[in-house]
Image: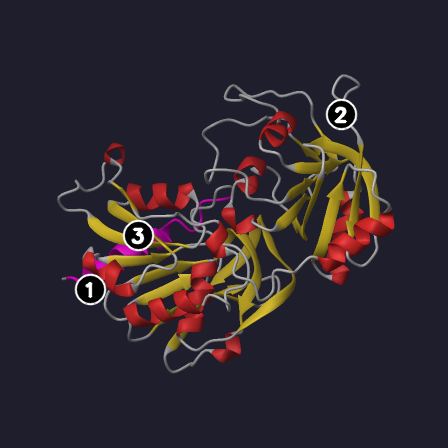
Amino acid sequence: MGLTEDNMQFQARLVLSDGLIYTGVSLGAAGETIGEVVFNTAMSGYQEILTDPSYHGQIVTMTYPQIGNYGVNSQDIESRKIFAAGFIIREYSPIVSHWQAQKSLDEYLKHNGIVGICEVDTRSLTRHLRDEGAQMGIISTLNSSDRELLEKVNKYPTLVGRDIVREVITDSPYELPVDKNTGSNSENTAYKVAVYDYGIKYSILRKLRSFGCKLKVFPANTLPEDIMLWKPDGLFLSNGPGDPEPLDYAIKSINALLGKIPVFGVCLGHQLLCLALNGKITKLKFGHHGANHPVKNMVDNSIEITSQNHGFVVDIDSLSSGDIEITHINLNDGTLEGFRHRSIPAFSVQYHPEAAPGPHDSHYLFEQFITYMKDFHA
């Protein structure tokens, strides 16, 4: 069952750029939205997914069949607003059952002006995206014809070659103290970590603070000399949306800071670090989006189940084997998931080690960053 009679809304349509059309029921706000349609295999965590800035410009399809049963709350947000362009699900649960719930998913989407669609055969849609690749799509509750919707979506620019990071980052630097409730170091002995914001999640900031780090978050276009004026002990390169190659300002800044302080990058930050080291980037057919991706740690031969959200990937053959040690490999498709530099204190992973949502297998990477800073400044 989907929406009940009491909250049944308008008919909605999903039109993909290749002409495939799905008809369903409106979820959230009325209107139209355009974005790159991707699928996420997580079974829960839809509120974290919706508010992850890495999904800016994308319409997210959830493969799990029923979404919304535990509602939403004010604690499980990952940024200041919903950044996903739209939401696609099979079955919406109008019944909310969780002690922290403050709103239903439908109310939350309406409140934020996000257009969604339910009663869609998400198995069919996921198979299509897997076979044909992620592509642009439009969700509409309006009276436009299918032809008009197809024309709109095909005129809309794709994510390739666009700098959309500037649309999600902080406007000005801000500081965050150590989380004193975790038993970590006091602020007097805390490591100062400069954070380049490319679309960072709140959970990453919380995790760094819990490991005894005092943070200052800088906009992505901050000059490296302004970073160093704060005298940080380390540099964190955050996650973020879209294609890394147009971010020439970020690549140049990272290159200028390499060797001066230890560097830890995740997701988009991982890709930018690789570009700063003369690596190359390619676009995946349908990306990695979910909380259950197996990754092999090549250092100790262990397996991590990871949380991932990216459409681009580093070309593993483009990195110099003399300078770079491959540390992590994706077990699904063999793509690069992590590396460390052999002589410069810098390492990165393609996935989200804070894992919100997702398993906590990769939290050790934050400890590794602390060790890098401790050894560098010894």
Q: Report the disc number at residue 367.
A: 3
Rounded to the nearest angstrom, the CA distance separating label 1 from label 3 is 14 Å
Look at the picture and state if 21 lies above or below 133: above
The answer to whether residue 209 is left or right of residue 130 is left
User: Callout 3: helix, strand or loop?
Assistant: helix
Instruction: Check disc 1 and report the residue beneath it.
Output: 376
Q: Nearer the viewer, residue 217 or 362?
A: 217
Q: Quadrant of the N terminus?
A: top right
The part of the chain drawn in magenta is 358-377
Sequence order check, earlier mark of 2 and 1 = 2
- Dot 1: few (<14), some (14–19), or many (≥20) neighbours within 10 Å? some
Q: Residue furthest top?
A: 6
Residue type at the position of mark 2 = Leu
Q: Nearer the viewer, residue 7 or 341?
A: 7
Residue displayed at 80% across by 59% down: 18
Q: Is residue 360 magenta?
A: yes
**Residue 194 drawn at (x, y percent):** 28, 54
Instruction: Check disc 2 and report the residue beneath it.
Output: 3
Residue displayed at 65% across by 46% down: 60
Closer mark to the observer between disc 2 and disc 1: 2
Closer mark to the observer between disc 2 and disc 3: 2
Q: Are marks 2 and 3 in contact (CB under 8 Å)?
A: no
Residue type at the position of mark 3 = Glu
The answer to whether residue 93 is left or right of residue 316 is right
Sequence order check, earlier mark of 2 and 3 = 2
Closer mark to the observer between disc 1 and disc 3: 1
Residue type at the position of mark 1 = Phe
The mark total stands at: 3
Q: Is residue 224 something one can see in this rendering?
A: yes
Residue displayed at 51% across by 69% down: 245
Residue displayed at 59% across by 44% down: 84
Q: Are marks 2 and 1 in contact (CB under 8 Å)?
A: no
